[in-house]
């Protein structure tokens, strides 16, 4: 075998070994980059879960506080009506107040003094829902009536 052939075979074997080493190094580098990227995504995901849980708890607390405020409203100082005149409905509005009815019932008032007031209790930055806004508009426009429905058995 000639020296040139041996050198050519050696160069080919060296090129194959160098390619394999460089390829494995490149693969290891790429793998490390992806593993770091996955770790960063996992951290972001964990933080997003913690934030979502915190928001959920805060929203739940706000809803509970609002429900408590609705129930306790007639006994709070800000409520300008007699608690005995207020009838809780809960949905879509919280109360119907028959202002003056307790006095009329007790013989201290007149039928003409009774006023019907629809009330929704809000706390914090809560606003009326679209349905509640529609009900308020119907009341303001006088689209209110009284009916008697008789049911015979």
Image (cartoon, helix red, strand yellow):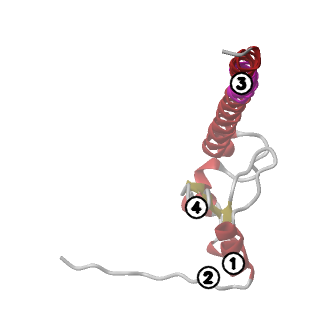
The residue depicted at 67 percent of the width and 67 percent of the height is 132
Label 4 near label 2: C-beta < 8 Å?
no
Q: Position of residue 34 (x, y in %)?
A: 71, 28
Quarter residue 113 falls in: bottom right
Alpha-carbon distance for marks 1 and 2?
6 Å
Span colored in magenta: 18-43
The residue depicted at 56 percent of the width and 57 percent of the height is 106
Nearest to the observer: residue 119 or residue 25? 25
Q: Nearer the viewer, mark 4 or mark 1?
A: 1
Q: Is residue 114 visible?
A: no
Quarter of the image with the C terminus is bottom left
Alpha-carbon distance for marks 3 and 1?
78 Å
Disc 3 target residue: 23
Return the disc, 4 or 3, that comes first in the chain's sequence. 3
Q: Where is residue 126 in the image (x, y as percent from the top left)?
A: 76, 51
Disc 4 target residue: 107
Q: Nearer the viewer, mark 3 or mark 2?
A: 3
Above or below 34: residue 84: below
Return the disc, 2 or 4, that comes first in the chain's sequence. 4
Q: Farthest residue to the front: give it.
A: 2
Q: How crowded is mark 1: few (under 14 residues within 10 Å), some or many (20 or more)?
A: some
Return the disc, 4 or 1, that comes first in the chain's sequence. 4
Q: Does the magenta stretch include residue 29?
A: yes
Label 2 near label 1: C-beta < 8 Å?
yes
Is residue 70 rendered to the left or right of residue 137? left
Label 1 near label 3: C-beta < 8 Å?
no
Disc 2 target residue: 144
């Amino acid at each position: 075998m000639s020296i040139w052939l041996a050198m050519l075979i050696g160069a080919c074997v060296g090129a194959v070994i160098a390619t394999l080493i460089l390829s494995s190094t490149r693969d290891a580098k790429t793998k490390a980059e992806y593993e770091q990227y996955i770790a960063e995504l996992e951290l972001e995901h964990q933080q997003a879960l913690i934030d979502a849980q915190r928001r959920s708890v805060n929203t739940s607390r706000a809803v509970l506080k609002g429900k408590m405020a609705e129930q306790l409203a007639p006994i709070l100082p800000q409520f300008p009506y007699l608690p005995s005149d207020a009838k809780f409905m809960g949905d879509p509005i919280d109360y119907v107040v028959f202002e003056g009815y307790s006095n009329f019932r007790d013989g201290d008032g007149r039928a003409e003094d009774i006023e019907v007031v629809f009330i929704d209790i809000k706390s914090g930055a809560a606003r009326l829902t679209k349905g509640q806004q529609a009900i308020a508009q119907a009341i303001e426009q006088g689209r209110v009536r009284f009916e008697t429905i008789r049911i015979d058995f």
